[in-house]
Amino acid sequence: DGGITQSPKYLFRKEGQNVTLSCEQNLNHDAMYWYRQDPGQGLRLIYYSQIVNDFQKGDIAEGYSVSREKKESFPLTVTSAQKNPTAFYLCASSPGEGSEKLFFGSGTQLSVL
Amino acid sequence: DQQVKQNSPSLSVQEGRISILNCDYTNSMFDYFLWYKKYPAEGPTFLISISSIKDKNEDGRFTVFLNKSAKHLSLHIVPSQPGDSAVYFCAASAIGGFQKLVFGTGTRLLVSP
């Protein structure tokens, strides 16, 4: 079955620690995205990538980093510089230009110990 | 600055009745609008969309209406079913925005039997 796989489902971070959230898709989509959801708020864009080896900052990129070395994979690192990392993180993909419909993974809940 | 607003955080409806979820936007460059449905601890799933060249789009029990002059769209669910209970997000993308969707804060719909 084609889809987007996020792992782990739950993740705990200690103070000063970097953690990496995994996102893999087998939909052959060009574009991939990372969103963050906080309670009572909409989804906010962290980073997005239109093509392999290229990515752009979204609206709230500070304290995060990404890489796009393979078409299928778009990992997100939450660095120690992100002072409020507790949130639900969603990865998404889309076929690319001409398609606004995003397909989402099931999310990762990140909490700070 | 919240460009996409869903002013009702929650809505309760009886099974079989109509559910109307509202969304307002401020950016006149938005030309494509989508509704996503989200269950707890899961990623959003695409529900229905509408282009700015239309004022109505229908898919089964779901209809989206767009009023460009008022910068307002609404999602109608008829008849509502208990399985429709979820959080509904309105999203918009701008001309040339390459699927950079801007999401509203969501409306939690509860359909009671």
Image (cartoon, coloured by chain):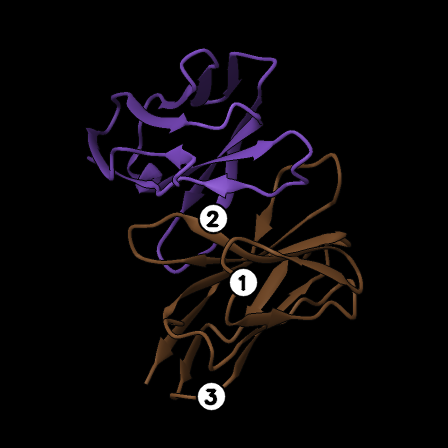
Q: Position of residue A37 (x, y in %)?
A: 40, 57
Q: CA distance from mark 3 to mark 2?
A: 29 Å
The alpha-carbon separation of the residues under discs 1 and 2 comes to 21 Å
Amino acid type shown at disc 1: Ala
Mark 3 sits on what residue?
A17
Same chain for the residues under marks 3 and 1 in the image: yes
**Does the rendering let one see residue A40?**
yes
Report helix, strand or loop for mark 1.
Answer: loop
Q: Quadrant of the N terminus of chain A?
A: bottom right
Question: Where in the figure is residue A81, as x and y percent of width and height?
Answer: 47, 78
Dot 2 amino acid type: Pro
Q: Which badge, 3 or 1, comes first in the chain's sequence?
A: 3
Q: Which residue is mark 1?
A: A61
Depth check: give the residue in front, A8 or A80: A80
In this view, the residue in front, B1 or B33, is B1
Chain letter for the brown colouring in the rendering: A
- Residue at left offset 68%, top offset 40%: B98
Q: Measuring 78% from the left and 70% from the top, which residue is drawn there?
A: A69
Mark 1: give few (<14), some (14-19) or many (20+) Cα within 10 Å: some
Q: Quadrant of residue A56?
A: bottom right
Are the numbered discs 3 and 2 placed on the same chain, yes or no?
Answer: no
Please give the chain letter of the residue carrying mark 2.
Answer: B
Point out which mark residue B77 bears. none
Q: At label 3, which amino acid type do we have?
A: Gln
Read off the residue under disc 2: B44
Q: Give the SS element for disc 3.
A: loop
**Image quadrant where one finds the C terminus of chain A:** bottom left
Mark 3: few/some/many CA within 10 Å (<14, 14-19, 20+)? few
**Colour in which chain B is shown?**
purple
Q: Secondary structure at mark 2?
A: loop
Q: Are marks 3 and 2 in contact (CB under 8 Å)?
A: no
| Residue at the (51%, 84%) spot, across then down | A18
